[in-house]
Amino acid sequence: MSVSRRETRRQIRREAIINVARISFFENGYAGTSMSSIAASVGGSKTTLWSYFPSKEELFAAVLEEETRLFREEMLSLLTPDGRLEDTLRSFCRAFLRKVLSDKAMNLNHLVIAEARRFPELGAIFYERAPKQSWLKIAEYMAQAMDRGQLRRADPMVVARHLLALCQSQTQLLRLWNVLPLPTPEQMDADVELALDAFFRAYGMPAKQDRPELCVGAE
């Protein structure tokens, strides 16, 4: 068998393991998922499974990476330097809020929150693979906006986290607590407008004040 065919088969096998693990983690929780049960579902021995993922923590990290990779790519592709900053952030925040309030995102948050006390490493894995990576990229964009004179100087990471927190402030916790159903697109757009208003009040550049011209030689 050629190297490329062997690598392809290995990649297909890896994806099959991740798909089975994803279902098990969401349905049974982290504690209720065992490497033995995953190996049995995929077919093959635990030794084979361990050759792909030496521990359950690494398998969980791989599931998180798959769950969050497309999210990051889709969201961060909206942060372009072209056009008005307000329009760019509006498009980004609308897409971001739709993602984080979705049932899929809620289920992932419930899983991590439910298991993080017993398995602290899960919180660390989630943080490193999901929020931290997004914050870093958004902070980079904020720093560039500051360099262009579109935002006042501040810690770019703080600015990035403030923007995301403002977007989620109206609804995320209520969704996590199962108090609120998925808001309508119109409701989410209204939340974004509130968030951007507060954000630009805090970090927008002050409007230039018109100064009266000096009349040289006037009596």
Image (spheres, rainbow, N blue to C red):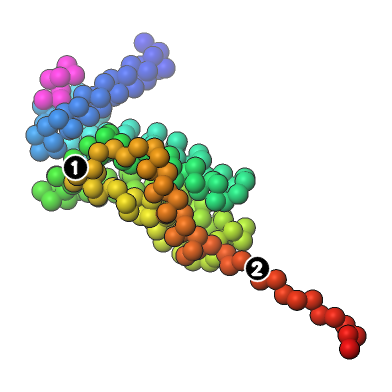
Give amino acid for label 2. Lys
In this rendered view, identify the residue nearer to me: 112 or 120: 112
Q: Tell me what residue is drawn at x 40 percent, y 33 percent.
A: 70
Tell me which residue sits at (70%, 71%) in the image.
210
Q: Residue furthest front?
A: 219
**Residue type marked 1:** Asn
Which quarter of the figure is the C terminus placed in? bottom right
Q: CA distance from mark 1 to mark 2?
A: 46 Å
The answer to whether 3 is drawn above or below residue 68 in the figure is above
x, y percent for residue 206: 58, 67
Main secondary-structure element of the magenta-colored stretch: helix
- Whether residue 135 appears in magenta in the rendering, the answer is no
Q: Secondary structure at mark 2?
A: loop
Please tell me whether residue 62 is drawn above or below residue 121 in the rendered image: above
Which residues are drawn in magenta?
Answer: 37-43
Residue 126 placement (x, y as % from top left): 27, 45
| Left or right of residue 164, residue 47 in this image | left
Q: Earlier in the sequence, mark 1 or mark 2?
A: 1
Q: Specify the quadrant that holds the N terminus.
A: top left
Tell me the residue that label 2 is attached to. Answer: 208
Could you tell whether 126 is left or right of 29 in the image? right
